[in-house]
Image (spheres, rainbow, N blue to C red):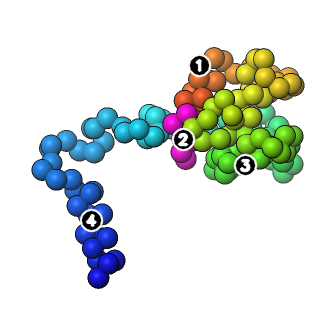
């Protein structure tokens, strides 16, 4: 009986009470909801072309044992200890300042800055990563 009640409660939560007539996608995202574009856009527009496709963090032997290729990067980053600094998480959800990934990418962080031998990420790209992490680093 407890499971049926739980399913009923979940159904009511999904349908909402009273209904505003708006579809859920039309409503503003709640706290902790991923930003527009979310991680898929970050992966496709930043991580794959700037980190993986250039041959460093992709392929058969990714640098630092960190594979940032499409479909793998989230699992390789979020909540994972850095190979270089095992006491630090690469991405600490909700905590951009505690995320070692940003320290390796932003000027003034740990050296050598990434990406090696390529133009640095723009401030806009860094801010997109910071915001994604701040929002909880959802896939």
Task: Please say if 9 is above or below 27.
Answer: below
Give the residue pinned by disc 4. Answer: 9
Residue 114 visible in the shown view: yes
- State the CA–CA distance, disc 3 to disc 2: 14 Å
Label 4 Cα crowd, 10 Å radius (few <14 / some 14-19 / many 20+): few
Q: Is mark 1 on a helix, strand or loop?
A: helix
Residue 136's label in the rendered image is 2
Q: Is mark 2 on a helix, strand or loop?
A: loop
Where are the magenta residues, as a range? Answer: 133-139
Label 1 Cα crowd, 10 Å radius (few <14 / some 14-19 / many 20+): few
Residue 124's label in the rendered image is 1
Tell me whether the residue at label 1 lies in contact with that at label 3, contact meaning CB atoms closer than 8 angstroms: no
- Identify the mark nearer the N-term, 2 or 1: 1
Query: Was residue 136 drawn as part of the magenta stretch in this picture?
Result: yes
Residue in the picture at 69% in, 45% down: 77
Query: Was residue 26 drawn as part of the magenta stretch in this picture?
Result: no
């Amino acid at each position: 009986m407890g499971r049926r009640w739980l399913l009923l409660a979940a159904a009511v939560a999904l349908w909402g009470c009273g209904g505003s007539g708006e579809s859920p996608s039309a409503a503003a995202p709640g706290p902790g909801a991923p930003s527009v574009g979310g991680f898929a856009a970050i992966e496709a527009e930043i991580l794959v072309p700037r980190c993986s496709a250039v041959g460093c963090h992709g392929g058969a032997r990714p640098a630092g044992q960190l594979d940032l290729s499409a479909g793998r990067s989230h699992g390789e980053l979020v909540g994972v200890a850095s190979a270089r600094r095992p006491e630090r998480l690469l991405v600490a959800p909700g905590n951009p300042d505690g995320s070692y990934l940003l320290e390796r990418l932003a000027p003034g962080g740990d050296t050598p800055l990434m990406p090696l031998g390529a133009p640095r990420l723009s401030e806009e790209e860094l801010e997109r990563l910071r915001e994604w992490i701040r929002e909880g680093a959802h896939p």
